[in-house]
Image (cartoon, helix red, strand yellow):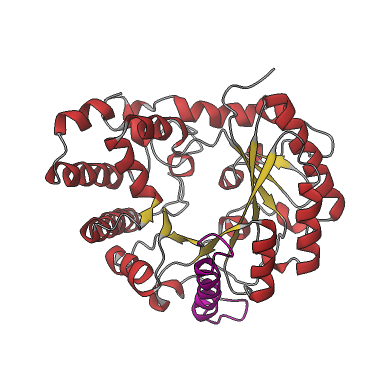
Amino acid sequence: MRDERIRDLNIVFKISERCNLKCDYCYFFFGGDESWKAHPPVVPRPVVDELGAFAARAARSHHIETITLIFHGGEPLLMSRPRFGEMCEALRNHEDGFRFDFGLQTNGVLVDEDWIALFEKYRVSVGVSLDGPPTVNDLHRLDLKGRSSYDRTVAGLRRMQEAAAQGRMSWPGLLSVVNPFADGAAVYRHFAHDLGVRRMSFLTPDYTWDSGAGEAVVRGVERFLLSSLRAWLADKNPKIRIRLFSEIMAAMIDARAMDLVQTYRDDYRNIISVSSNGDLGPEDTLKTLDPRFRSLGLNVARSNLSELLESDAWREQADAATQKPDDCADCGWWKICKAGRPINRYSARRGFANRSLYCAGLKDMYAEIGAFLVRNGMSLSEIALRVAA
């Protein structure tokens, strides 16, 4: 049976389950799920072909025209360049009635001209992970010998920016994990003004209600978001897009954008993960919450997408996308908030039936964006009407 919620399937493909950095907050290696130790360090060729066939079956069964495939890790560039090219070729050979849209998330350290040539040839969009200037980035993102990764990451970013300016590849984006003790405005200005980044995402730390994050950490994350937002708004540069902020602003302005936010924001029902051994699961961070989210017994070699969609773990996280926690019952921001990232809502006792750990900061963020629009000529009643559930 066709699942109407599957429109554009996103597959996070773990092509390497090892890394050349040791970021101490990394959910994949230090989040409690140690299944990676039993998986191949680099995805074997048979798994690549099995994933291609799985994707083709999913596209036919669910009438999907585009499947976004994100090469992920660990560090995906630990795969050799020839093997990466062979993988892309093999996957393209499975395109029949649908197409793959390739993306890749990297720490950037290994990016060189040969890698850029592969990104150009196979039309791979790239995101780079960086947390800020060296004083911020090097608090957590060190290599296996405890050395700074900042200069090498920025060198890789610069190479890709130069290639993008030449029209060889799309402009690289940037993914930054919020540091609760950093100045959000300074981090934003470093990315936008010093490094010339035009597309970035700020990701709240992967704490749950059971993590014991502490008041100082929670309030620090919220201060970071508000500070970086205010700096971005002050720039008034429409060429700079921060996903967390830009999507909300667009939703307050335009009804179509609101529909997209209401449908997709922090909704993982279009995202699946595939390990280097071919095992299927829901969005990657959910696997750290409990074994029930990672031990599904499904694999691309023998399973279909519908089997994943019908699993108990999938239904649980799917329900989280549509059902209001009691804490959110009277909140006017639900339509654009959806209680935040699922991992930040989770507790062992109540599952996803909690508001976000960062609820107060998210509310401040939405109010700040709305106030900015009003100061710049938009009607408050128009915003309120659009945001109202």
Q: Which residues are magenta?
A: 143-171
Q: Quadrant of residue 178?
A: bottom left
Asked whether 158 falls inside the magenta stretch, the response is: yes
Residue 341, position as x, y percentages in the image? 44, 42
Q: Is residue 77 visible?
A: yes
Nearer to the camera, 20 or 87: 87
Q: In which quadrant of the rendered image does the N terminus lie?
A: top right
Residue displayed at 35% across by 71% down: 190
Residue displayed at 73% across by 25% down: 61
Q: Does 311 sit above or below residue 142?
A: above
Q: In which quadrant of the rendered image does the C terminus lie?
A: top left
Q: Is residue 80 visible?
A: no
Asked whether 42 falls inside the magenta stretch, the response is: no
Nearer to the camera, 137 or 241: 241
Residue 126, position as x, y percentages in the image? 57, 60
Describe residue 325's horizontal placement relative to residue 297 as left or right.
left
Residue displayed at 27% across by 55% down: 229
Q: Does 161 sit above or below residue 299?
A: below
Image mark count: 0
Residue 268, position as x, y percentages in the image? 54, 37
Nearer to the camera, 353 or 234: 234
Residue 19, position as x, y percentages in the image? 66, 67
Describe residue 166's horizontal placement relative to residue 45 as left or right.
left
Describe residue 368's horizontal placement relative to residue 141 as left or right.
left
